[in-house]
Amino acid sequence: MKKILSGGKTGIRALILCLLFFNVGLAAGDKEQERTNQETMKLTDGLEVKLIYGPDTNGPEHFWPGGSLKDLFLKYWKARLSKNWEEAREMEAPYFQEMTTAGRYRMYISGGKKQEWAELKLVQFNWEEEQLCRIKMVLYFRLENGRVKKVHLSDRWVKAEGNWYHVIRDGFFFPGV
């Protein structure tokens, strides 16, 4: 180090170049890690939503307990974000389908203001029971004025008779279910 610093301007330039190169290398590594921890969901209207695995998830290969839940999760959220209520309703738990009307569910999925979905960030996967899991996530969307908002969600899935089903919990919209 003394030798580099005693080399005058040339030594300092070499030191600065080394530091810049090292930092650029680290930044490029971070971007590569970021790219490997994200996927893209194509919605039916042609828009795309980024599916990002948060830093504590260890990426897609360690997040999911099995391929079938991941595939169903992606299918469900693609249908839901595309406002395809019929397809999303088929993936709800059977008891929910029996206890709610199709019209109310359609209003739940299709209603609300038009927004542009930007990202779905997976934060945490937890087993609550042997056949019941919770996926914590953050949904980012862009409003008409361009501002980005986020909603924290806690998504539940139950495995019954070998099949995974989404579990809706909304006491306001579906009281008593």
Image: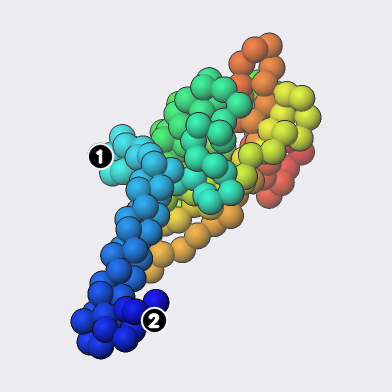
**Residue in view at x 33 percent, y 84 percent:** 5
**Residue in view at x 39 percent, y 81 percent:** 2
**Element under disc 2:** helix
Position in image of residue 45 (x %, y %): 28, 39
Q: Nearer the viewer, residue 171 or 168?
A: 168
* CA neighbours of label 1 inside 10 A, class few (<14), some (14 to 19), many (20+): few
* CA neighbours of label 2 inside 10 A, class few (<14), some (14 to 19), many (20+): few
| Residue situated furthest top in the rendering | 161
Give the labeled residue for mark 2.
2
**Residue in view at x 49 percent, y 45 percent:** 53
Counting residues from the start of the chain, the first of labels 2 and 1 encountered is 2
Inspect the image, locate mark 1, and give the three-letter code of the amino acid beneath it. Answer: Gly
Give the labeled residue for mark 1.
46
Inspect the image, locate mark 2, and give the three-letter code of the amino acid beneath it. Answer: Lys
Position in image of residue 136 (x %, y %): 62, 46
Quadrant in the picture for the C terminus = top right
Examine the rendering and report whether any part of residue 38 can be seen.
Answer: no
**Element under disc 1:** loop
Q: Quadrant of residue 125?
A: top right
Residue 168, label in figure: none
Examine the rendering and report whether any part of residue 4 can be seen.
Answer: yes
**With respect to residue 131, does 52 lie above or below?**
below
